[in-house]
Image (cartoon, rainbow, N blue to C red):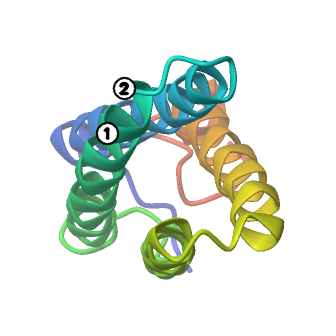
Amino acid sequence: MPNSIVRPWALALFRASVTCEAALALGQAVLAGSFLSGHYRALDLHALNATATGLTAVAQIVAALLLWRPGGGPGWPALAGIALFAAEAGQITMGYDRTLAAHIPLGVAIIACTFLMLVWAWRPAAGPDRARGESA
């Protein structure tokens, strides 16, 4: 496959969506910890933030699709975004069902994967000239 340059607007949009997703995911952990520390109102905020996180995951999928086509970047972030959204949908369901034995470890995994995506999105190799994973 010939070298292709990723369009800067597509990469910027993707980076913005991933950054928002990571901030919201970190907020989920903070709010859960606050609830477990006895601040019971934090549970309502945790639920509200879960909705925002899910909506942002949808925006991240759209941004990843635009990064891929027409942006010229790789397609795997769109697939990863879909998997993240599916995990978050399951996470929200388990949270409302109070299935904490699965809810807490899945939350940790979601945050870890979100931050791995954040690191990939912001690393220099993901920049406009190298986002396809090809060497210069």
The answer to whether marks 2 and 1 mark residues whose Cβ atoms lie closer than 8 Å is yes
Residue 129 appears anywhere in the view: yes
- Along the viewing direction, whichever of 16 and 114 lies nearer the viewer: 114
Q: Secondary structure at mark 2?
A: loop
Q: Residues within 10 Å of mark 1 (few under 14, many from 20)?
A: few
Q: Residue at x 28, y 32 (%)?
A: 16
Residue identified by numbered label 2: 41
Q: Which residue is mark 1?
A: 44
Q: Residues within 10 Å of mark 2 (few under 14, many from 20)?
A: few
Res 12 → quadrant: top left
Relative to 39, residue 29 above or below: below
Residue at the (56%, 80%) spot, across then down: 1
Q: CA distance from mark 2 to mark 1?
A: 6 Å
Q: Is residue 15 visible?
A: no
Q: Which percent across, then down, holds residue 37?
A: 68, 17
The amino acid beneath tag 1 is Asp
Instruction: Report the amino acid beneath label 2.
Output: Arg
